[in-house]
Image (tube, helix red, strand yellow):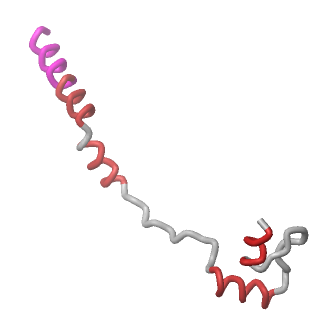
Amino acid sequence: VKGLANLLKTNLDKGISADESELLRRKNAFGSNTYPRKKGRSFWVFLWEAWQDLTLIILMIAAAVSLALGIRTE
């Protein structure tokens, strides 16, 4: 653990210093601690993916057959 703390140039008891120049130097050395935002998917993409699901396709076919048989018997 001490070796890792030395590698990251931090103090195990006090953590990192709050000095602005030190934080900027650390950000340049180690990179920002953020993930890039992914582009959101639209409703139509979710709908298209749902149509590709085999279970949903079988259920829709069963519903259509049930509706057709229900209308025919009435």
Q: Residue at x 80, y 76 (%)?
A: 10
Quadrant housing the N terminus? bottom right
Is 65 one of the magenta-colored residues? yes
In the rendering, at what x and y percent does residue 74 appear?
14, 9
Relative to the observer, which residue lies in front, 26 or 67?
A: 26
Q: Quadrant of residue 9?
A: bottom right
- Numbered marks: total: 0
Residue 62 appears left or right of 9: left
Left or right position of 47 against 20: left
Kindly report the secondary structure that dominates the magenta region of the rendered protein: helix
Residue 51 % position (x, y)? 24, 42
Q: Nearer the viewer, residue 9 or 30?
A: 9
Q: What residue appears at the point 29 percent right and 43 percent down from the top-left corner?
A: 50
Q: Residue furthest left?
A: 72
Residue 65 on image: x %, y %: 14, 21
Instruction: State the residue at coordinates (18%, 20%).
Output: 67
Q: Which residues are magenta?
A: 63-74
